[in-house]
Image (spheres, helix red, strand yellow):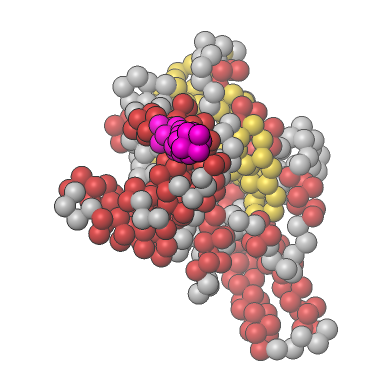
């Protein structure tokens, strides 16, 4: 009898082990077939009973990575890497690159390289991942010192609700709302202030989605034209926005050396050649290894927006509100972790200037686009000659003059922010913070204010001369 009970006890121990092994084998087969939907629940069951199982952790980590759940993937992959699962080295290195942890990424890549010395395909894949990491690192080192004042996470299907443009900046709407035959086109169409020109993207089975424009002819739009030469701009293009100067256009593209999905680019129209200049890729934090798009700058409000799905749940995007700057100023710091955080937008308050109160701008950014925020007489008063005075950008007849004056308005907004900051520093100095650092900052800012004032006057003078020379 005792022998019988011993046999039964042994069988009761062997059965769960056998089932456990079978579960792992089933999960492996599904995983290798890339059938992650069926493999995932089996692996999660294995993990719940054996959280230190190296194979389960690796496969769950890879699945989470492929599904875009990067923070969840990190936990699994780090344990698998500690357990020396070769595949986890590559995926963890890729994940660390996305988190801008480049030293940690290279450590994982080295481990993967040692484990695959004789595997030519694996080493070629590794070389590609290193190139991506190196490019990301170079871009992180060129992160702009932009003040991001607000953010909101919204469903991608309805993300335009976060853009509260003033009427002078134009209008945004889904392409399929304007073109009723474009049912599947979920991109964005931009209409200028005068409502006589539209910009949008259309799908092309050969070249992907490309940007087009149309002008209003009598009561209908027509004369459709591609915005760029199709062959000169690779990848998909979408999400156009044209500045009030009528020359500068922001758009998103998956080509032009994009670092991941859509990246934001800017180009300008050249009146001399009637073509657009080669597009420039924006720096971080505007771009990332994820989808970044719909850059909009409202000249009237002095506010900009852009959307990104970086580290967002599937189907959602984060729309960031920022203060546009006329000049590109990079973050100057020796703290690599701080720069990486700014590039990733880990915290929007890290970008704030302690001497500036952003509450009014944040409130302004949320005002409905139909609310007039300019004086009824116009946006400004710019004397052209004794008989003519302009009050809006649309009053300009010559494109170059309009561009120059628009640049002067941007500089004036920067100047206002600089003066506010200067006043704050002077107040700190007067209240007893009389250290050399603040004194130097005041002197430098005073020089910048004076230089900017001269630049504003110079741009206005050139704008006036261009308008008179070409119009009157």
Instruction: Reply above or below: 183 against 81.
Output: above
Nearer to us in this view, 433 or 319: 319
In this picture, residue 100 sits left or right of residue 31: right
Q: Looking at this view, name the residue that lies furthest to the right.
A: 431
Q: Nearer the viewer, residue 423 or 144?
A: 144
* Picture quadrant of residue 177: top right
Q: Is residue 26 left or right of residue 240?
A: left
Residue 3 within the segment the image draws in magenta: yes
Question: Image point 19% across, 49% down: which residue?
Answer: 119
**Is the residue 321 above or below the residue 25 in the image?**
below
Quadrant location of the C terminus in the rendered image: top right
Viewed as shown, does residue 418 lie left or right of 37? right
* Viewer-nearest residue: 167 or 165: 165
Q: Which SS does the magenta portion mostly show?
A: helix
Marker count (numbered): 0
The image shows residue 239 at horizontal and vertical percentages of 52, 33
Within the magenta stretch, is there residue 379? no
Q: Which residues are magenta?
A: 1-24
Q: Residue at x 83, y 84 (%)?
A: 431
């Amino acid at each position: 009898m005792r022998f019988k009970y011993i046999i039964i006890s042994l069988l009761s121990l062997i059965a769960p082990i056998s089932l456990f092994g079978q579960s792992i084998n089933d999960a492996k087969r599904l995983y290798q077939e890339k059938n992650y939907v069926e493999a995932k629940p089996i692996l999660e069951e294995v993990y719940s009973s054996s959280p230190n199982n190296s194979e389960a952790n690796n496969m769950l980590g890879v699945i989470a990575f492929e599904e875009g759940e990067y923070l969840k993937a990190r936990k699994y992959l780090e344990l698998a890497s500690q357990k020396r699962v070769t595949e986890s080295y590559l995926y963890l290195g890729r994940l660390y690159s996305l988190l801008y942890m480049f030293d940690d990424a290279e450590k994982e890549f080295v481990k993967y390289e040692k484990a695959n010395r004789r595997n030519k395909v694996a080493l070629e894949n590794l070389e590609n991942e290193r190139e991506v990491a190196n490019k990301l690192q170079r871009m992180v080192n060129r992160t702009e010192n932009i003040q991001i004042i607000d953010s909101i996470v919204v469903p991608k299907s309805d993300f335009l609700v976060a853009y509260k443009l003033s009427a002078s900046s134009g209008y945004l709407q889904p392409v399929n709302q304007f073109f009723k035959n474009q049912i599947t086109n979920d991109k964005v169409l931009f209409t200028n202030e005068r409502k006589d020109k539209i910009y949008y993207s259309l799908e092309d089975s050969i070249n992907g989605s490309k940007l087009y424009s149309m002008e209003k002819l009598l009561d209908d739009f027509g004369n459709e034209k591609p915005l760029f030469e199709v062959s000169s701009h690779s990848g998909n293009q979408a999400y156009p926005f044209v500045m009030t100067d009528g020359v500068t256009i922001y758009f998103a593209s998956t080509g032009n050396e994009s670092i991941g999905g859509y990246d934001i680019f800017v180009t300008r129209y050249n009146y001399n050649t009637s073509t657009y200049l080669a597009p420039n890729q924006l720096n971080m934090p505007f771009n990332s290894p994820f989808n970044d798009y719909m850059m909009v700058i409202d000249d009237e409000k002095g506010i900009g927006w852009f959307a990104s799905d970086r580290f967002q749940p599937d189907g959602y995007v984060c729309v960031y509100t920022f203060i546009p700057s006329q000049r590109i100023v990079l973050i100057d710091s020796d703290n690599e972790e701080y720069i990486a955080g700014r590039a990733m937008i880990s915290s929007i308050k890290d970008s704030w200037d302690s001497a500036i109160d952003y509450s009014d701008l944040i409130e302004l950014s949320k005002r409905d686009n139909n609310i007039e925020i300019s004086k009824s007489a116009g946006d400004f008063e710019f004397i052209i000659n004794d008989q003519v005075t302009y009050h809006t950008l649309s009053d300009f007849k010559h494109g170059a003059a309009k561009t120059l004056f628009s640049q002067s308005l941007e500089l004036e907004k920067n100047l206002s922010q600089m003066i506010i900051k200067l006043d704050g520093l002077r107040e700190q100095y007067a209240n007893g913070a009389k250290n050399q650092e603040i004194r130097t900052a005041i002197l430098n800012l005073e020089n910048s204010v004076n230089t900017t004032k001269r630049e504003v006057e110079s741009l206005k003078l050139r704008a006036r001369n261009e308008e008179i020379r070409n119009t009157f």
